[in-house]
Amino acid sequence: MTTQTQLITGVDFVMVPTRDYETARKFYGETLGLPFRKQWGKMPAGEFDAGQLTIAVMQPDAFGAEFSPHSQAIEFHVDDFEAAKAELESRGVEFVTETIDSGVCWQIHFRDPDGNALAIHHRYAGQG
């Protein structure tokens, strides 16, 4: 009998590209309110905690790579959808969609200063 071990056991971080690290750091830390974890030495890159996922914001040109924004949203969980939406609007976030109600969740999309797709999300049904 062979024992099979799971090869991939989680996600350590998701990379988010930026053209201007300091602007992105302020957006993710202050506007979104994500706790800052650490900077990558003196490089224009750093990590933010988003629950069980780390968001690594990085300026690609400093690492010899080309900038290209994400077009598919990172969906941030919120407990109180309407309160989170209102608070983000008060902090200058402009939503680019209306609220989407899928029948099990609400979500609404916005972009960071570099055009990366983001959203807030709340599942209100089907949470076994």
Image (cartoon, grey):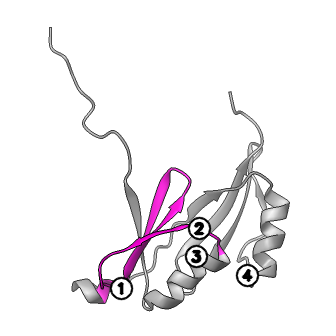
Q: In which quarter of the image is the C terminus?
A: top right
Depth check, front residue: 63 or 106: 63
What amino acid type should be assigned to the residue bearing mark 1? Pro
Start-end of magenta stretch: 32-61
What amino acid type should be assigned to the residue bearing mark 2? Leu
Instruction: Give the quadrant of residue 39.
Output: bottom left
Q: Is residue 47 above or below residue 121?
A: below
Pointers 2 and 3 in contact (C-beta within 8 Å): yes
Residue 55 location, x and y as percent?
46, 65
Residue 73 got which mark?
A: none
Residue shown at 76%/37% (left/top)?
125
Residue indicated by mark 1: 44
Depth check, front residue: 52 or 72: 52
Residue indicated by mark 2: 34
Residue indicated by mark 4: 94
What amino acid type should be assigned to the residue bearing mark 4? Glu
- What SS does tag 2 mark? loop
Residue indicated by mark 3: 29
